[in-house]
Amino acid sequence: MSAAKQAQLIKLEKRALHFSVWGNVFMVIIGVGFAITSFSDAIMLDGLYSFIHLLIALLTLRVSKLVMKPSNDEYPFGYWMYEPMINMAKGLMIITLLTIALFNAIGSLYGGGKMVILDMAIFYAVLATIGCFVSAAVIKHWGELAHSPLALVDAKNWLVDGYISAAMLGVFIAAAVMQQGEHAHWVPYFDPLMVIVLVLFIIIVPLSIIRDAWNEIVGKHPGEDIEDNIHALIDSVVSASVHKGYHLRLVMTGRFLLVHIYFTVKANTSLDSVEAQDDMRETLYQVFRKQYPYIAMDIVFTQHAKWERIVTGDQSQGQLHSQQHQNDIKTT
């Protein structure tokens, strides 16, 4: 990636993350403020959710700079692993908040519910719903342009927060209508019930964030769609006539896609010199980075298939146990 292109992507990511930080500052202030004045635990949950989001957003700004630093003696493979780690921390903190809110809501139900000043609660819900959905759209747009997993996770959190606020708005309006009728005695139970429903609804998001971050930390396969695309790019560049097959390994860590390719080349072909192999590496790199701007690549050329087995940890001379992509060619 050229320095100018990288600088442009970093600028877009910083813009998205700074927007998220200031958006969360605003949401925390109005959330906690309206929660205190309206006596709503549901609004307090929304405000505390934004507070956790703010803390993580500030940490995310630091991590976004860290992952772009080059490797060094202390971190020979760079700082890529910090990106999924921060996403996992975000998921764990949200789950902790939801657990506390759930127990408080259950206790409030047993205590006879809680009266809420509905006019203020409705005003907050309208303001929060608009703010969250607008923030989600803006951050997602900049995050996609920057190819930033950090910003995209932030956008997902804003979207969820928007759904929370929209659900609260509907419940508060229903409570205001019911308060004028014969079922007004049920209104105090609306707020704790809403907290319970919101917890059950949004807990899926931090669980999915933790799952994805864990898969990246342990080096799980990034998915068949990415692998199929990489295979197609390789086959469009490297002719089947110069190799007997190749073994592909992929790992996605945060924004970085690590691509390892091990070609078993034929003798007396265009790939039997170091210069030709370097040219092929350059060609593949240029093709890959058009679709994956943050890519780390290692390509090995060998005439002995055993080196493919050794690199995957299988040092036996038997059958290759790892998955291997082989073109339908016959060795002459």
Image (spheres, rainbow, N blue to C red):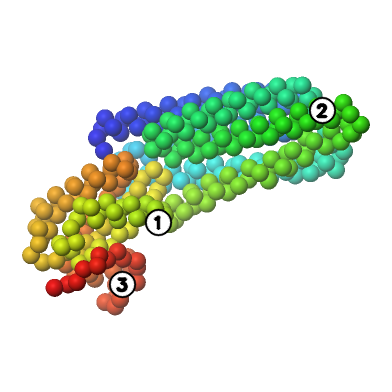
Quarter residue 180 falls in:
top right
Counting residues from the N terminus, which is met first, the one under dot 1 or under dot 2?
2
- The residue depicted at 42 percent of the width and 54 percent of the height is 223
The image position of residue 248, as x and y in percent, is 30, 59
Mark 1, residue position: 224
Which image quadrant: the C terminus?
bottom left
The image position of residue 196, as x and y in percent, is 73, 42
How many residues crowd around disc 2 within 10 Å: few (fewer than 14), some, or many (20 or more)?
A: few
The image position of residue 125, as x and y in percent, is 68, 27
Label 2's element? helix
| Above or below: residue 174 compared with residue 100 | above
Camera sees residue 307: no
Q: Which amino acid type is shown beneath numbered disc 1?
A: Glu
Q: Which amino acid type is shown beneath numbered disc 2?
A: Val
Mark 3, residue position: 320
Label 3's element? loop
How many residues crowd around disc 3 within 10 Å: few (fewer than 14), some, or many (20 or more)?
A: some
Q: Which amino acid type is shown beneath numbered disc 3?
A: Leu
